[in-house]
Image: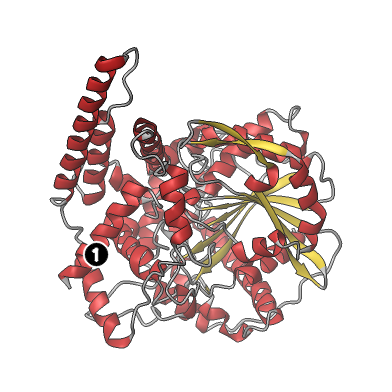
Amino acid sequence: MHSLYERVKKVWFVIWILLVASWGWGCRKSSQNPQGAALSGQSMATSQGSQEKATALRFRNLLAFHLGEQGLNPQSIHETMFLQPNSLNNIPKARGIESFLKEIDKLYFVSKPEDWYNQGRSQPSSPVTPKSGSGVVTLVVFPGFSSEFIPVDPFEEILKLGDRGESAFAKKVKPSLEAMTDEVYSVRDQKQRPVKLSEVVRVGSYDRNGHPWVNIIMLSPKLGSLESIGKLASTVPIYQRRLDKILRKTPDLGKIYLLGHSRGANVALEFLRATSLEARKYPWVGRIEGLVGLGAVFYGTQMADEVFSTESSPQQQMRVLLTDLMSRLEEEPQGLTGKAYTTEVAARVLRNANAYRKVLAQFTTLSKPAAIDLLIEEERLRHVQSTRELPGLLGNFEMTRGLLFDLINMQCPFSCYFQNIKAFKQVVNGVLEGIKSLTTPDRMAWWKHESLPTRFRILSLAATMAGPVENHKLSPIIGLPHYGYCLPDFTLVQRPSYYFLLNAGGGPLNDSAVSVARSRYWPQLDSMSGRSYDFLGVMASHHFGIAFPAAVVSQTGGGNSFPRSALLGALGSYLRDL
């Protein structure tokens, strides 16, 4: 079983170095409330918990309807969406933002995914037919952290139909996207390059009876654009420019909500805040009604905290190594010609090679995460019952090709050497900045000091994987269908990341990137009081599964079975009724 740790260790090293991902997302008068809208008493806390449970039941029944409409068994809803156990109905009364977050973390830390599953199983769904109504719901999807390194977009199944012109919304909008242009940064070329707007914005729709029920406008970051990493504010002007071209010319979009997966929810929040301040320049912001967070990292994740901690851990050690490497890597000498230039180039290449060797040597000495022993035990128990699917070389060829030729330029490894060094440093620094934006201090500072208008409603959907090994036994729900138990996403990335987050203090109720407590909106942590919000519930999947069919393709080409189309349908049904 020692080989498992070495395999996971190598995978995480590749993730860090190649940066494939870091999964480790009507106006009411408002008032400033720097300490958060703290609850005034236990009765209000109980009322909040009861209201949220009723909201989740309502959404669950809509989801059951859409599952049935797609030919899936609506009675298996408890395998798709869990329900909050009664033990979490009473919200802590702690006052102040920091103390409230600590109390919520403590409350959720002792809650187990199996408790949520059993609560849902004991409460059968009653599928509710949605109101047909008129108009449509449009979701503008903001991608998550490092999503440019994943070869598919959230809700790829719907978007592929749009690419082929097989969805009602795409038929209507795609021709105008083809006719408009934009620009995108290329880290490989170190400059902006012109593109058709359709290359960076994809469209599709979830249709019912030949008519769009939910439109999707997907802000699709390209590999090497740096749009899914770096600081939140760096992407906002880019998305403002692109959406301005679309929303000005597409008036009949119905109710418009932003949907942010993972860190994309944080980018969307900053987008709403910044764009509202420029409402005269972007009048269409008045048509946006709110935000849906899907696996959102609203209040930071303990895994990012560990990366930037002063205490030693594998993640912290890797960050120190990479930071040291970035400071040592030398770029092309300037102001030299002839022999002096050639001599200096040779010296810098040699020093860079020594810097790489030093990092590789130190990597082998990284300490072992405490949670790895539980992961190893789980791997041993799982192999008794099942056979893992390995990554497919052909299926992942596009990702590899992109990393080698779109992120850096391996077509000219020698003449493009310093260009590749500069690109590598930009990406690594961007990733580190992006991870820092996911730390608890950064997120809490945003909520404490940024005034997002309260007219924007915030909805949230979280997810959780099965609980860890206990008493030398697997979690009884680890084999639920939407976890992709044997797929590479689960075995190579999501499950190790689940244990790493558990080890960092995220608790067993986490989706591999963020805990449920941090993935849902809390009015007590908002500097603006009086905001409408909806906690729609917890999905039985992982951080990838709720958004992507597969980030790492298996040999059989199979993807995660989570019903993302039905989820979109249910979101549309719920938002229509607001």
- Drawn side of residue 347 relative to residue 20, left or right: left
Position in image of residue 335 (x %, y %): 34, 12
* Residue at image point 39% right, 61% down: 512
Count of residue discs: 1
Q: Is residue 305 above or below residue 206?
A: above
Position in image of residue 443 (x %, y %): 45, 41
Q: Is residue 508 visible?
A: no
> Helix, strand or loop at disc 1?
helix
Instruction: Please state which of residues 151 and 569 is positioned toward the viewer in this rendering.
Output: 151
- Give the residue pinned by disc 1: 7
* Residue at image point 54% right, 46% down: 222
Instruction: Please state which of residues 425 and 61 is positioned toward the viewer in this rendering.
Output: 425
Query: Quarter holding the N terminus?
Result: bottom left
Query: Quarter holding the C terminus?
Result: bottom right
Residue extending furthest toward the right: 134
Position in image of residue 344 (x %, y %): 24, 21
Residue extending furthest toward the front: 338
Q: Is residue 170 visible?
A: yes
* Residue at image point 44% right, 43% down: 407
In which image quadrant can residue 250 be found? top right
> Residue type at mark 1?
Arg
- Drawn side of residue 117 relative to residue 420, left or right: right
